[in-house]
Amino acid sequence: MPLGITVVDYGMGNLRSVARAVEHASQGRARVEVSDQAQAIRQADGIVLPGQGAMRDCMAELNARRLIDPIRECLGRKPMLGICMGLQVLFEFSEEDPDTPGFGHLKGDSVRLDPGSDESGSPERKIPHIGWNRVRQTRIGASDAADAADAAVHPLWRGIADEERFYFAHSYRVRPKDPALVAGCCDYGGEFTAAVAAERLFAVQFHPEKSQRAGLALLTNFIDWAGQT
């Protein structure tokens, strides 16, 4: 029987592109539904939480559709993949909208990427960060070098080369308080967190649906993971 994968629809993000990519990656092993219904989220075998824009708008749309509680109920209990803003809303807040709380499932916040400045005072880097960049996989649960030897790379990286390139489109980066949450890092004028993992949750700053072969591999791994957990 195919797995049921629900892509959460709250009016923000490339929902259809995400759904098509998940369907393609599943090779018929999953039934993919784009839905804004609480029941579809609660009954899913796996959940994809995409998103673009500001946290304030994202949380407002989720609240308007009464999806805050269903998602919160599933966090840590069902396999969930957060994408872009779907990563950032898992944290406590964003400096862009400090009065808007996120889910707070993960401790930490989101801050604007640093454009830097050259000798003339002009920005060194364009913000938002748009385009391809390499992601360094890190060992989950490793808070320091001593832990890394005993930790493992997350199953969603299976078959994906370290330093593989993924497609990004964002202006803010997350800052987890617990370094053991970090599952992947990227550099854009300094290292930032590109992926986090906790319990049955994996969330990424990049867009797997736009990341061609590597992105499809990650989505395939998510479907495999959802079927095992």
Image: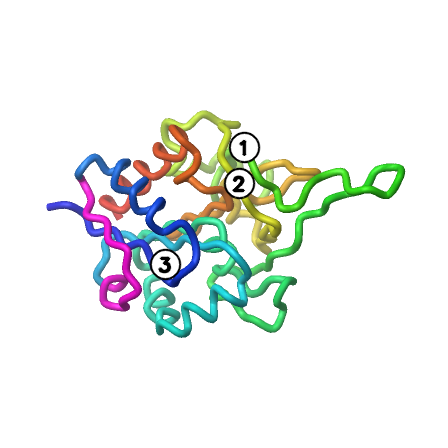
Viewer can see residue 212: yes
Q: Residues within 10 Å of mark 3 (few under 14, many from 20)?
A: some
- Cβ atoms under marks 3 and 1 closer than 8 Å: no
Residue 201 % position (x, y): 39, 52
Q: Residues within 10 Å of mark 2 (few under 14, many from 20)?
A: many
Query: Could you tell me the amino acid type at mark 2?
Result: Phe
Helix or strand or loop: what does disc 1 sit on? strand
- Cβ atoms under marks 2 and 3 closer than 8 Å: no
Identify the residue at horizontal 58%, vertical 37% (top origin): 186
Membership of 37 in magenta stretch? yes
Against 73, residue 198 (above or below) is above
Identify the residue at horizontal 35%, vertical 32% (top origin): 217
Q: Nearer the viewer, residue 202 or 96?
A: 96
Mark closer to the observer (3, 1): 1
Residue 226 % position (x, y): 27, 46
Q: Point out the stretch of residues depicted in magenta.
A: 29-42
In the rendered view, does 112 fall on the left or right side of 205? right
Viewer can see residue 200: no
Query: Could you tell me the amino acid type at mark 1?
Result: Trp
Query: Could you tell me the amino acid type at mark 3?
Result: Gly
Pick whichever of labels 2 and 1 is earlier in the sequence.
1
Residue 99 % position (x, y): 61, 73
Give the residue pinned by disc 1: 132
Identify the residue at horizontal 33%, vertical 49% (top origin): 16
Helix or strand or loop: what does disc 3 sit on? loop
Give the residue pinned by disc 2: 168
Pick whichever of labels 3 and 1 is earlier in the sequence.
3
Give the residue pinned by disc 3: 76
